[in-house]
């Protein structure tokens, strides 16, 4: 990518897209193309076609998606499948039609089978049943990966797929019901601290293991891979380290400064028992994360205080 190359970041107001945009601006890229969802509905085939034909981007980061936590995924199953398929189909196909030099499709670690061996290697894709609660979202993302591979095989497109682990950071979603576990806990602990609540209830047993990557680290990895990775199939992006939800909750409790007690509600779903990425492929290319979890939670909490309090 040249500094003057026209680069389209789809989903630039989300946590991932905004991090990629910040990274590109920091690296001196000036010809950056963005559209809000009200300016361009990526679910609308005609609108996406017109946009690509008019703007002719050279590079595309496809970070736009309908996303949410375990409750949102399970409640809006049709929406998650339909809308994500629409977004991917429209953007990937128009990238091919208008001769985009390179496209990066961002997936999710939920594409892997629920009971896949740990850590999750790239080749475990489609080797078992998916986690039921977010199956529609996972199926959409798997379709996106296969679409990139198919356009590469049939048309020679340089379309690549990256699979980030669980993400958190600036511009995260702190919705009480529809957010992911880390931002949800930041909000819960903060509100309990402010309201003088004696205990915080955490969904599930606390035993599932999860890996977390700071979104700006993901952006750094995406920037690195856009310049170095040109292969069929996907590549994992993560830290290669995980911890229990209980330990995560204790860490957030410490960062936020909540003095009360923790209680776990085992009647709520745990989701996948463990979800750790095998990042040996990424490490072998020369990239490793910079922001450790406690530091990242401090940064995320500061961002939450600035924007939501």
Image (cartoon, rainbow, N blue to C red):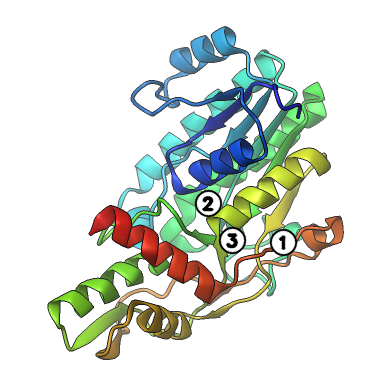
Q: Is residue 210 visible?
A: no
Earlier sequence position, callout 3 versus callout 2: 2
Above-or-below relation of 91 to 84: above
Q: Residue 24 versus residue 185: which sits nearer the camera?
A: 24
Q: Are marks 3 and 2 in contact (CB under 8 Å)?
A: no
Q: Quadrant of residue 172?
A: bottom left
Tell me which residue sits at (28%, 83%) in the image: 258
Q: Is residue 28 left or right of residue 129?
A: right
Vertical arrangement, residue 227 with respect to residue 280, above or below:
above
Q: Position of residue 274 (x, y in %)?
A: 56, 75
The image quarter in which residue 42 lies: top left
User: Which residue does the numbered mark 2 point to in the structure image?
Assistant: 138
Q: Position of residue 165 (x, y in %)?
A: 59, 61
Residue for badge 3: 165
The residues tagged by marks 2 and 1 sit, at their Cα atoms, a distance apart of: 14 Å
Q: Which residue is mark 1?
A: 124
Report, in whole angstroms, how far the alpha carbon at label 1 lies from the one at label 3: 15 Å
Q: If the image is split into quadrants, where does the N terminus sit? A: top right
């Amino acid at each position: 990518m040249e500094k003057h190359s026209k680069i389209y970041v789809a989903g630039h107001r989300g946590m991932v897209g905004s991090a990629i945009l910040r990274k590109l601006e920091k690296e001196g890229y000036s010809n950056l193309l963005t559209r809000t969802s009200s300016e361009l509905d990526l679910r609308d085939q005609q609108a996406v076609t017109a946009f690509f034909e008019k703007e002719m981007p050279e590079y595309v980061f496809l970070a736009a998606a309908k996303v949410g936590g375990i409750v949102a995924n399970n409640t809006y199953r049709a929406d998650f499948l339909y809308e994500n398929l629409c977004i991917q189909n429209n953007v990937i196909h128009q990238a091919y039609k208008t001769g985009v030099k390179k496209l990066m499709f961002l997936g999710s670690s939920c594409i892997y089978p629920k009971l896949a061996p740990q850590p999750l290697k790239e080749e475990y894709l489609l080797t078992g049943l998916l986690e039921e609660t977010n199956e529609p979202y996972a199926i959409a993302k798997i379709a996106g990966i296969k679409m990139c591979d198919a356009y590469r095989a049939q048309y020679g497109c340089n379309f690549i797929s990256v699979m980030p682990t669980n993400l958190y950071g600036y511009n995260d979603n702190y919705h009480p019901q529809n957010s992911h576990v880390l931002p949800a806990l930041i909000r819960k602990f903060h509100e309990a601290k402010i309201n003088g609540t004696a205990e915080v209830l955490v969904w599930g047993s606390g035993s599932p293991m999860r890996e977390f990557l700071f979104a700006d680290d993901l952006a750094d990895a995406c920037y690195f891979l856009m310049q170095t990775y040109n292969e069929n199939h996907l590549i994992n992006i993560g830290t290669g380290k995980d911890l229990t939800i209980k330990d995560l909750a204790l860490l957030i409790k410490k960062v936020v400064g909540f003095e009360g007690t923790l209680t776990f509600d085992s009647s709520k779903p745990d989701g996948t028992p463990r979800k750790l990425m095998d990042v040996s492929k990424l490490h072998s290319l020369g990239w490793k994360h910079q922001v450790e979890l406690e530091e990242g939670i401090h940064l995320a909490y500061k961002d939450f205080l600035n924007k939501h309090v």
